[in-house]
Image (spheres, rainbow, N blue to C red):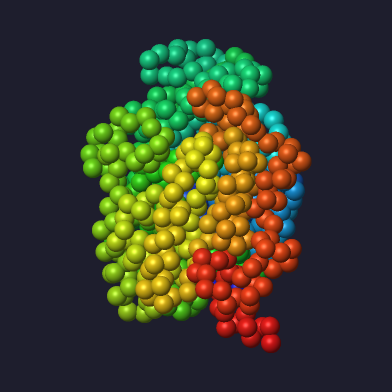
Amino acid sequence: MPEHDLTAFIPLTREEMKARKWDAIDILLVSGDAYVDHPSFCAALIGRLLMNAGYRVGMIAQPDWKDPNSLKTFGTPTIGCAITSGNMDSMICIYTAGRRMRHEDMFSPGGKTGLKPPHASVVYTQLCKAAFPGKPTVLGGVEASLRRVAHYDYWQDKMRPSFLVDSKADILIYGMGERATLEIFKRLKNGESLAGIPGTARFPGAKESAEIVPDEHTVLLPDYETFCKDPDAIMTQTIQVEREMNPWSGKRLLQQYGNRYLVVEPPQPPLKPEEFDAVCEFPYVGRPHWIYTERIPAFETIKDSIPVVRGCPGGCAFCGLVSHQNHFLVSRTEDSILRSVEKLKKQKFFHGTISDIGGAAGNIYGHGPFDPEKCKRCCRPTCLFPSPCPNYHADQSRLISLLRRITCTEGVKNLFINSGIRLDLALMQPELTEQIIRKHVSGHVKVAPEHLHPRVLHLMRKGKADEFPKFKKIFDRVNKETGKEQYLIPLFISNFPGCTEAEMKVVDDFLSQYNWSPQQVQDYIPLPMTMGAAMYCSGKAPDGTPIQVNRGLAERRPQRNMLRRKRDGEGETLAEQRGGRKNNNHRFRPRGKSDGNRKKGRR
């Protein structure tokens, strides 16, 4: 018997189920990630949510997807199965932008690859149906969420139907899904219909579909046959879906597949702050399950961090976060966050440094509308583009207060913000921005200008081209005043739809001007359900204007290489050639290495 508290985690073994004195489980939770009991990991959060509601839950993490028997650790669940691919789309975990296999899976023990199948949501659902015939299957998570309607799959380079159609799950949950999850399993337990639950999609049979009559409360998406044949259909669909993403005023979506309808209900409203507090304060152990003997890279990244905000106001065209979490923000209360700090301090691995408090960005905590009622009628997919909504309150006072309270907590030596900083908001919050640079930078600040050409930035739904230079001036000034040596890590995207080599050269020239050789360059990936994917497939901007799209590897290589090449020489960057002594507070530097360390290494 392992020397562990067998009732601390969600049961992953039969011994843990017996230790809880259960003779069976009600719900089997299947995940494509290793089990880390932390609120940043979706399977742990949903498992804790269901256990808190009184259900007996067992988890199977990364099962052998070729063998249904790999799901039978706990026997047959009395109610049904809940399935997720994990924290990321499985195709992103497995393949690069160049459609090559990745060398590491951040969510697997030891970073091992091959433990998760492509399109894991579909594969695991079919596996559950084979293992437990007749038991309901509930599909959720970010992969299912971004593939809830017909979509383009970049890695297969083809249009695919909703994952609900492919998997034959009984129902699909999109978005963060806490309310929908509880409602679904309550209805399954009571033998009730699953129809009409906000934040869900169903694929009813031909008989029920024939009774569906589109009305003023529904929106007809392009049918699947048209979606596959007409390049413009994906743009039409994306605009329609974005318009109906408001939880309070969005309409039901219908998409026809032969003689059946895919039915997508309006989104669930975001959690209230006290509800978000509750799901973040379930009795998580705060570390990976004891069964693992190898480190899990994704946990190592976030183990000293605390989630404090959910959602993203940006709505960038390349990002799937808004399609999943929506752009309506919810922030935890300060008291709840301080309780999480006290819990983190008790972890053996904690040495006084909180690595991050954040979410989609490090400077969005506490933001919200001046008038919530106006938001309930809004059809915008973003709060910040093409200009900030007049109703958007970029309140810097709440994060300033939170930072001060945590910093004054006994046992906290350092408090850093490592979530990326939104440049547009940083310029709107001067006091907060200066405080972050002065006191809460671990040596590097991640910012995401993504591009520097106005036209490309407009297509990306990003801010203005001068935001990054303005932020850099503030960054350099504060560093000079404090005498600190800190570095900017700007993230850029190559080959975004509409970006030509001439426009990419604007970024290239800027980097050459400052002798920067970026360590992080993202070659564009068209994620399902994003506006960027619609532009990539249709070859048009949202207004119908034709744009250049680089699709094949040969077409994409020049822009990618443009950003990845070294500056001022084929070997080292200019700063490296000078021994790291150039007074350049915004050059790139390997994380954690100071000038002194570099000099010692050379000796």
Of residues 178 and 475, the one nearer the viewer is 475
Q: Is residue 105 visible?
A: yes
- Seen in the picture, residue 440 relative to 216 is either above or below; the reply is below
**The quarter of the displayed image where residue 496 is located:** top right
- Seen in the picture, residue 575 relative to 266 is either above or below; the reply is below
Query: What quarter of the picture does the N terminus occupy?
Result: bottom right
Point 41% across, 77% down: residue: 483
Of residues 160 and 48, the one nearer the viewer is 160
Rendering coords of residue 14 (x, y %): 60, 60
Q: Which residue is farthest right? A: 554
Point 53% across, 33% down: residue: 531
- Seen in the picture, residue 572 relative to 262 is either above or below; the reply is below
Point 37% across, 55% down: residue: 426
Q: Is residue 74 left or right of residue 38?
A: right
Query: What quarter of the picture does the C terminus occupy?
Result: bottom right
Point 53% across, 61% down: residue: 489
Of residues 401 and 544, the one nearer the viewer is 544
**The quarter of the displayed image where residue 566 is located:** bottom right
- Seen in the picture, residue 341 relative to 536 is either above or below; the reply is below
Rendering coords of residue 534 (x, y %): 57, 30
Q: Is residue 292 visible?
A: no
**The quarter of the displayed image where residue 107 is located:** bottom right
Q: Is residue 56 left or right of residue 132?
A: left
Rendering coords of residue 600 (x, y %): 64, 86
Label count reads 0
Rendering coords of residue 409 (x, y %): 31, 75
